[in-house]
């Protein structure tokens, strides 16, 4: 690991709005943090909560779901579906001890490259403040039976 | 006699219900007796670990292993029985995917000990004694198994040939599997889930289904279900849409939402995430086109009525879930288990 921590964000971008917003941010040479690894999905509703959990377990520090504004979904209500899942996922993740800033949803239309860029910048700052997630190492431990947080020895009781 | 198969059954972190389920197969148990010598079954017959250690490798033809792996003893027995068994079956939800014991993964060992040995109202322990792995007594050292921080499924510690889901598995499913083995039927490829269906519980459920749109979620004591109508439609949590069939939709038929004990459907890695999607999809947010803030509020209000999403969605599958356990800090506050 390098000594400065660079958060890794997995970004699920809707093909019709947010992916184009990201394109626009690029072509209009907006400067924003390079920490997001974009994945194009046909709709924010395509983002199965399993994708989010997998990303977090496999090393992402945060996940950004980006879609069209409510009312503007290419598939009419896909983004509302994504929003409902997201709200429930947030509650679930809190029970797992995962901070709410680590999974975010943002609406960015095809013309809003700046909105997407700002969301990424903001999220990177928030993740920087939280520090790395490192689920495999710190939570699952060597074999998953072990201590749950790095740094603390296992309690001595059986 | 000599060519009778050798049968073993073992319980690790379990409730005993799986043993009862096997005994509950009625007169079919006589077929088991006629076709197998029981060579290890702590619940039903007096054998010792030493006996098992003395068997040659692969001596046991069929071992039904129930219970999750929560202590070093459970783990040792898993390794021993793996070595001694030709067919090792993860029997029941605990062995298959962690089940109720693995809900402990939402908290820490420290917090569990605190509740069990210090704080529960029925505990009297003025000296605050906690179990110790090693204790000195005049006769020497006493050792007890180590209690792990994280509960695992059987296949997370040894390789498993088959999985029989259910909490506990249904008698007719157990009979079907035993019959197949007794009759020497060709067995499915190792790693298969047997003794269960392939569709969702909803497809076996006779309750009437309409369009689902729920405004709030009721806990079981808050509402008497209207008979004959899908429970989820009535706002009662039912995990039938994301649970493997095989039980005959036992629970919804008597007005109790499916809890998900038959585990995930084929191709689903994380049953909880699937439940989450299913529940989120039926939440009614009214006509589209309102203000974004109103929409947020409306969704939040429904979510608020769902107590303990993690415990609800992962009631049986925490150990097998993608995240597997909650993050709890090393200071021993043991938080992380409550919303
Ligand atoms: S699967 Fe259910 S019945 Fe079987 S041991 Fe576990 S809790 Fe008990
Ligand atoms: S009651 Fe449950 S299992 Fe039956 S149809 Fe409704 S959701 Fe499916
Ligand atoms: S209805 Fe659900 S909880 Fe009840 S036995 Fe069937 S799978 Fe298990």
Image: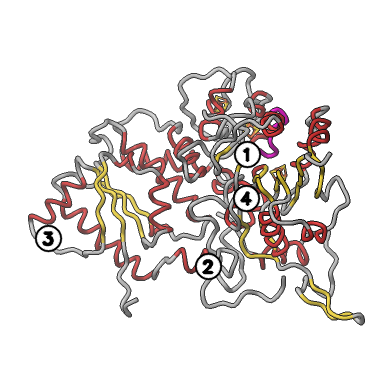
Residue A106 in picture, x, y percent from top left? 29, 49
Quarter location, residue B222: top right
Residue neighbourhood size for the residue with mark 2, other residues' Cα within 10 Å, grouped as few (<14), some (14–19), many (≥20)? some
Q: Nearer the viewer, residue B178 or B198?
A: B178
Question: The numbered mark 2 sits on a residue in which chain?
Answer: A
Question: The numbered mark 1 sits on a residue in which chain?
Answer: B
Left or right, residue A62 beside residue A68: right
Residue B94 in view, yes or no? no
Residue A26 in picture, x, y percent from top left? 12, 56
Same chain assignment for discs 1 and 3: no
Q: Nearer the viewer, residue B37 or B328?
A: B37
Q: SS of the residue at dot 1?
A: loop
At a point 87% along the width and 81% down the height, the residue shown is: B140
Q: Which residue is mark 1?
A: B165
Residue B85 in picture, x, y percent from top left? 69, 50
Q: Is mark 4 within 8 Å of ligand 1?
A: no
Residue B62 vertical placement versus B69 (above, below): above
Q: Nearer the viewer, residue B243 or A112?
A: B243
Q: Which residue is mark 3?
A: A30
Q: Which residue is mark 4?
A: B98
Q: Which residue is mark 2?
A: A141
Span colored in magenta: B165-172
C-alpha gap between disc 2 and disc 3: 40 Å
Residue neighbourhood size for the residue with mark 3, other residues' Cα within 10 Å, grouped as few (<14), some (14–19), many (≥20)? some
C-alpha gap between disc 4 and disc 1: 11 Å
Same chain assignment for discs 4 and 3: no
C-alpha gap between disc 4 and disc 3: 48 Å
Residue A105 in picture, x, y percent from top left? 32, 50
Residue furthest right in the image: B138
Q: Is mark 1 within 8 Å of ligand 3?
A: yes
């Amino acid at each position: 690991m390098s000594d400065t921590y660079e958060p890794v964000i997995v970004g699920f971008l809707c093909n019709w709005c947010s992916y184009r917003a990201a394109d626009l941010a690029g072509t209009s040479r907006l400067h924003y943090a390079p920490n997001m690894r974009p994945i194009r999905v046909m709709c924010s509703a395509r983002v199965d909560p399993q994708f989010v959990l997998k990303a977090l377990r496999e090393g992402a520090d945060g996940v950004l779901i980006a879609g069209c504004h409510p009312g503007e979904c290419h598939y009419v209500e896909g983004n509302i579906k994504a929003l409902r899942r997201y709200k429930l996922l947030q509650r679930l993740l809190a029970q797992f001890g995962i901070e709410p800033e680590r999974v975010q949803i943002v609406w960015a239309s095809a013309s809003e490259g700046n909105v997407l860029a700002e969301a990424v910048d903001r999220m990177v700052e928030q993740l920087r403040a939280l520090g790395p997630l490192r689920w495999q190492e710190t939570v699952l431990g060597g074999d998953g039976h072990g201590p749950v947080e790095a740094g603390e020895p296992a309690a001595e009781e059986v | 006699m000599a060519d009778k198969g050798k049968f073993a059954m073992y319980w690790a972190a379990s409730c005993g219900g799986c043993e009862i389920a096997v005994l509950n197969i009625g007169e079919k148990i006589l077929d088991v007796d006629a076709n197998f010598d029981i060579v290890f079954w702590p619940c039903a017959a007096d054998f010792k670990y030493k006996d098992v250690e003395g068997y040659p490798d692969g001596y046991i033809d069929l071992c039904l292993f129930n219970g999750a792996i929560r202590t070093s003893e459970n783990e040792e027995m898993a390794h021993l029985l793996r070595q001694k068994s030709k067919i090792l079956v993860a029997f029941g939800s605990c062995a298959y995917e962690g089940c109720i014991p693995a809900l402990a993964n939402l908290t820490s060992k420290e917090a569990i000990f605190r509740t069990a040995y210090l704080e529960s109202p029925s505990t009297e322990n003025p000296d605050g004694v906690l179990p110790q792995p090693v204790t000195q007594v005049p006769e020497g050292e006493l050792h007890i198994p180590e209690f792990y921080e994280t509960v695992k499924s059987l296949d997370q510690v040894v390789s498993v040939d088959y999985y029989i889901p259910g909490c506990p598995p249904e008698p007719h499913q157990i009979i079907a599997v035993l019959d197949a083995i007794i009759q020497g039927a060709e067995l499915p490829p190792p790693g298969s889930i047997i003794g269960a269906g392939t569709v969702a519980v909803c497809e076996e459920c006779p309750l009437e289904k309409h369009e689902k749109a729920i405004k709030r979620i009721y806990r079981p004591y808050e509402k008497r279900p209207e008979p004959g109508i899908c429970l989820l439609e009535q706002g009662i949590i039912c995990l039938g849409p994301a649970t493997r069939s095989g039980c005959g939709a036992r629970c919804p038929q008597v007005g109790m939402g499916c809890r998900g004990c038959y585990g995930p459907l084929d191709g689903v890695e994380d049953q909880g995430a699937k439940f989450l999607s299913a529940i989120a999809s039926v939440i009614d947010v009214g006509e589209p086109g309102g203000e974004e803030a109103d929409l947020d509020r409306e969704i939040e209000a429904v979510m608020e009525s769902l107590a303990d999403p993690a415990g609800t969605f992962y009631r049986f599958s925490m150990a097998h879930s993608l995240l597997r356990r909650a993050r709890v800090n090393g200071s021993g506050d043991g938080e992380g288990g409550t919303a």
